[in-house]
Image (cartoon, rainbow, N blue to C red):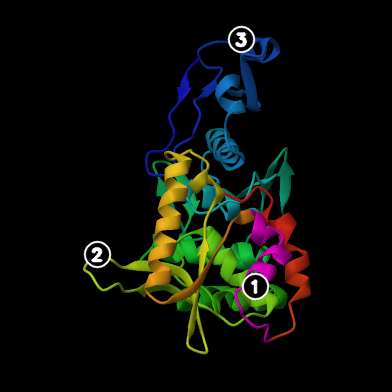
Amino acid sequence: MSLLIAPGEALASPVPLLDRAGSPHGDRGVRSGELVRVRRGIYAPASVWRSLAPWDRYLARVHAAAHVYPGAVFVRESAAVLRGLPVFGEPPHIHAVTPGSATTRAIADIRFHSAERMPRHDDLAGVPVASYEEIAVDMARLRHPAVGRAIADAALRADPTLTVGRMRAMSETHPSSRGRRRAREVFDRASAVPESPLESVSATVIEALGFPLPELQVWVRGPEPGDDDRLDFAWWRGGRLVGGEADGDVKYSGAFGDAREALRARRARDARLLRHGVDTVQHWSWSDVSAPAQLRAMLLSAGLPILRPPDLGLLSSLAPALRGAP
């Protein structure tokens, strides 16, 4: 079978994609368990496919769709995954826009959306992909605020020319007043300062729980050169400095080195922060943010007050939106 070459300027397919140009026996490979069918006429090695993370399976599916529908402009999560922006789990649908599409239509798992104008996009080695600005605006208008914030923050980090003002202005051109209102709430908070999707989502959840808004990426200086540390989140409360660290579970899983060494390094860093005036450091992961009662208990135990009623709508819809978080 011939190998489909992934676009060099987009995030490459994490698995080899094979078509039937060189051999008619793809379906036989599926029956034998050697291959999986990614979409009609396109296959991937089953052993590799089964080991992929959900967002990597989605990336492979988008690449397969790009091969079948050349010229389609990929938007929303499909553009996000091609550009390396956060994708939560494995979205069920691939999203695209084609020239002259007057109505939204579905072909298997692909949604071809109608559009009053073609989205701004770039040609990434032959694949049209919506711009960072278009992706951020769509996700802010259409998805959970925590997801929209994570995408907007990541887009600002990825494209130094992009500004919140530009995203806000584009959003205001959309006809849906509800979508514009949702996007305003995201763009009021969007920033390139958070360094990961977990930090962006954490900031959204902390605000929704009613806690004081933290300062982000705060340096704690030590007495000696090079003896400095940076906190993801910091609160000053009555002369006390409370620190917060959004640590993905994978950091201590052993996937990127010895897990015990990573934990030892964390304990040493926490001890250094305490010596330098931090009153306490709380660590949380995706599981704590997805179940916000756990994060609430952590921050209360650190002495942080609740200043506002919680946003129950945002919090109650959080777990499904974050399912399969990266």
Viewer-side label of 3, 1: 1
Q: Residue at x 48, y 59 (%)?
A: 196
The answer to whether residue 240 is seen in the rendering is yes
Q: Where does residue 150 sit, x and y in percent of width and height?
A: 55, 63
Query: Is disc 2 surrounded by few (<14), some (14 to 19) or many (20+) residues within 10 Å?
Result: few
Which stretch did the figure color magenta? 287-307
Q: Nearer the viewer, residue 99 or 35?
A: 35
Label whose residue precedes the other's in the sequence (1 or 2):
2
Label whose residue precedes the other's in the sequence (3 or 1):
3
Mark 3: which amino acid? His
Q: Where does residue 301 sit, x and y in percent of width and height?
A: 64, 72
Query: Looking at the rendering, which quadrant does residue 287 occupy?
Result: bottom right
Disc on res. 226: 2
Query: Is disc 1 surrounded by few (<14), some (14 to 19) or many (20+) residues within 10 Å?
Result: few
According to the image, label 3 marks what residue? 25
Mark 2: which amino acid? Gly
Label whose residue precedes the other's in the sequence (2 or 3):
3
Q: Secondary structure at mark 1?
A: helix
Q: Is residue 301 left or right of residue 199?
A: right
Viewer-side label of 2, 3: 2
Q: Nearer the viewer, residue 195 or 132?
A: 195
According to the image, label 1 marks what residue? 301
Query: Looking at the rendering, which quadrant does residue 11 occupy?
Result: top left
Q: Residue at x 70, y 63 (%)?
A: 294
